[in-house]
Amino acid sequence: MAKRVLVVDDEKLIVKGIRFSLEQDGMEVDCAYDGEEGLRLAQGQEYDLILLDIMLPKLDGFEVCQQIREFSTVPIVMLTAKGDDMDKILGLEYGADDYITKPFNILEVKARIKAIMRRTSPRQQAKERPKVVEDGELRLDSESRRLFVLGKEINVTAKEFDLLELLVVNKNKVYSRENLLNLVWGYEYPGDVRTVDVHVRRLREKIESNPSEPKYVRTKWGVGYYYQG
């Protein structure tokens, strides 16, 4: 079945170029040119991935991302025309999985999309992962992509789930932030290891009783992160 992508950007030439390129690869592409239209489409359709510009009319990309996260874990890649790191970090804080800075090479965009889709495809999950992972108070269901702590379901994004699952399955193994970028994001990531820090912080806020003194996702200072059940 063809992968379905939603592109939300008010620059029609950029949308046209992305749409043409993705359709050449056999994907189905829906387009929206403002935040409200993008949110409406995301609410009414199932997508494999959403490309979401930050600077949008009506609702900005951060607001759209935040509202989508209330009902969906679909992978979201933010597009930003600014070189400002704060935009990138804010996008991740609001629940985005990745970001791409404009101007971009369409081949880079396609590589990112395909890598994320490989990581989140049901076929890949079934082939590589056990169906249910349990460790102490945590229970991860890889088929339904659901996380439970002490029997209570915790709402996490696709990348948060992937990150935690990798650490839990490889208990006590320390991963550098660069290694986590490559394994969880699925490609040689171009540079910003703070992406991992943001996702770890969000995870801790959701699963730890005291995020400042985590008992699950631990830091090995100067090295990286590991899971200690």
Image (cartoon, grey):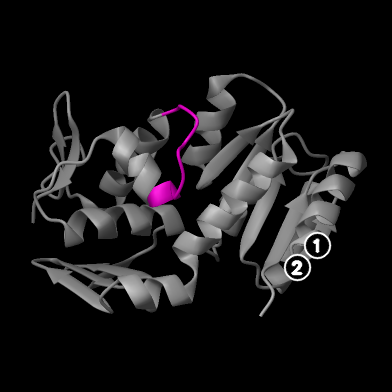
Q: Is residue 128 above or below residue 52?
A: below
In the rendered structure, the answer to whether residue 121 lies left or right of residue 20 reads left
Q: Nearer the viewer, residue 81 or 93?
A: 81
Q: Are marks 2 and 1 in contact (CB under 8 Å)?
A: yes
Q: Which residue is mark 2?
A: 26
Q: Residues within 10 Å of mark 2 (few under 14, many from 20)?
A: few
- Residue 143: x and y, percent? 37, 78
Considering the image in quadrants, where does the N terminus appear?
bottom right
What is the three-letter code of the residue carrying label 1?
A: Glu
- Residue 148: x and y, percent? 25, 69
Q: Nearer the viewer, residue 14 or 42?
A: 14
Q: Residues within 10 Å of mark 1 (few under 14, many from 20)?
A: some
Q: Which residue is mark 1?
A: 23
Q: Which residues are magenta?
A: 184-192
Distance in Å between CA atoms under marks 2 and 1: 5 Å
Q: Residue at x 44, y 59 (%)?
A: 158
Q: Residue at x 58, y 56 (%)?
A: 114
Q: Can residue 201 be seen by looking at this rendering?
A: yes
